[in-house]
Amino acid sequence: MLVGLALGDMRLARSFPTAASNDLHIWRWGRLALIAVALTLTAWTAIVGLRLVHPGVLPGTTLDGRPIGDLDRRALTQAVAFYAQERASETLRIKTVTSRSTGKQVEYSLARLGFRVSEKETSELIWSRGRQLNPVLALVDHLRAFTGGVEVRPLTEVDDDRYQVWVASAADELTADPVEAELDITGTSVTFVDAQPGLRVDPDVVAARVLDTLSAGDSLEVEIPATERLPEQDADKLKSLVDQAERAVSGPLRLTRGEATIELAAAEIGDLLSVVKDDGEPRLAIAAVALDAAIGDQARVAFEHDPVDAGIRLSGGGVVIDASQRGFRFDPNIAADQITAVATSEASEGHGAREAEIDGVILEPGFTTAEAEALRITERVSSFTTKYPAGQSRVQNIHRMADLVDGVVLQPGERFSINEHVGPRTREGGFTDGGVIIDGEFETEVGGGVSQFATTFFNAAFFGGYEIVRHQPHSYYISRYPEGREATLNYPDVDVVIRNNSPYGLLIATSYTATSVTVEMWGTAWVDVEAWTSERRNVKEPELITRESRKLAPGDERSIQSGRQGFTVSYGRVLRYSDGHQDEQSWTHTYLPEPRIIERGSQNPPEPEALSADVAG
């Protein structure tokens, strides 16, 4: 309490000074002012003296460690300019740093960053040292100049636009994409390249860190924190393919099928192999397009063959079934997968040739051996033969027609048309001239005479019990054929069509000699056929037609056509089936009377009328 009071009295005494103490106070301050003025004058006197002795830059002055003391104003400007050039060419080193290691490192000149020394301002700053208006500061600089020296730091600036451009470029350069693991297969060489993580830096961090470093001025190395970017691919999974790849290129590989062979050398396999991904999982594969090009057309076609249908034919008096065969087509996609599997399998270890039967597209025949056997074509069901004189031109047409129809096989329910199967009768098709009936007269035409084959075919089907879908007898009766039960042809409208209405297959077999043609129906006997033919009725005598001809002398005559009776006849068959029921079919046909034609000699015969085709004879 006493200390407190005493202190309180002292404060109270100061608050109410006496007259004597006030005068003393004024005197003290006045003396101090005089001393300050004296010191200032002394300092200025010293400074002026020193400046007279050293009129340039203060002795011992350095610019960023470079001595520039005692330089005059011009030399100082040059020194600062030279220093500015040096600084602009200095290199800034930047390296990225991750949590695990030091990453990428790059270097840039300070000029590229837009950094520069403010030459004029720096020169003025250096020149002002020791020349300040404040005599104390000026005197201190002089004292420093003669004791430890005056260190001046340059005044610098950064062009913002250039700096931002550089930051973006540097950030992009410091950023590195991850390096995916790679399996390189070239020829027989297999090389695994491990994955490397990538880096990503933030441009804002680059901008701030570099500015801080430039401002500090004591280092030109900057560390930038970076984020690792891991590769997308699992390097371990890719590395696991190395053994497979090495097996694949350990030796040649041979693919065979029958007598055809393709061999790929080890280096060829390596050049074809590559790594692909299935649902993100790496695997070795061969591109189908590359394999197709490497093998070539000639080698590929050697593997290929069309399917062969089963054949049904007669031999040695019986039915023979020629077995069907599958066809094969080379498929580069299938072959590429197969070669990859064979080459990379553990069974292919070693340097010997790997061999496999090539896989591809199997082409099934349209008619298999089993299908042929199921038709049960085992016996001759019916046969019919007609005869003709040897040496006639129409015999060639009959034989040609027989050759074209021989061997036809009909499935149960299938129809057969002679016109559709044989087509137009032309010389190019192997036919020649033969007899036809045109406007009631017998003439010659290409393909004529094939009605004899049609009649033979019709009767074989008739006695086999097969359905007669369409047939047309001749307009005039020809004595070499059964009455009514015969058929003519004229492409394309006059045709013979049958249907295999049996439950079994039907093989049509034909044969011929110089004087006869035979058509046989082979299958399985399924019905008994009894044919019948009625007596002639409505018999009509032939008409006499007389013509005048310039080829004959007046009064002479000759017989062109002897003429035959016309008549109506019915014919048919009784079909008796194994289950006891029977069926009867009948047809009726009227033959026109064949006119008797006589030519007589005349000097002025009438112009012949245009002829129109009727039916083939």
Image (cartoon, helix red, strand yellow):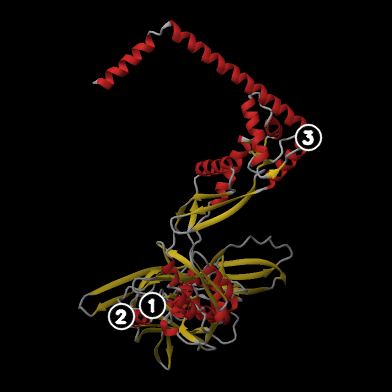
Q: Looking at the image, is mark 1 or mark 3 nearer the viewer?
A: 3
Residue 530's tag is: 2
Q: Is residue 196 visible?
A: yes
Q: Rounded to the nearest whole Å, what is the CA distance between mark 1 and mark 3? A: 136 Å
For label 1, the crowd category at 10 Å Cα-Cα, with few meaning under 14, some 14 to 19 and many 20 or more, is many
Q: Which residue position is annotated with label 3?
A: 72
Which of the two labelled residues, at mark 2 and mark 1, occupies the earlier sequence position? 1
Q: Residue at x 45, y 7 (%)?
A: 20
| Front-most of residues 448 and 114 | 114
For label 2, the crowd category at 10 Å Cα-Cα, with few meaning under 14, some 14 to 19 and many 20 or more, is some
Type of the residue with mark 1: Ala
Type of the residue with mark 2: Glu
Q: Tag 2, which secondary structure? A: strand
Query: Where's residue 323, x and y in %?
Result: 41, 85
Q: Looking at the image, is mark 2 or mark 1 nearer the viewer?
A: 1
Total marks shown come to 3
| Front-most of residues 279 and 164 | 164
Type of the residue with mark 3: Asp
Q: Residue furthest top?
A: 19
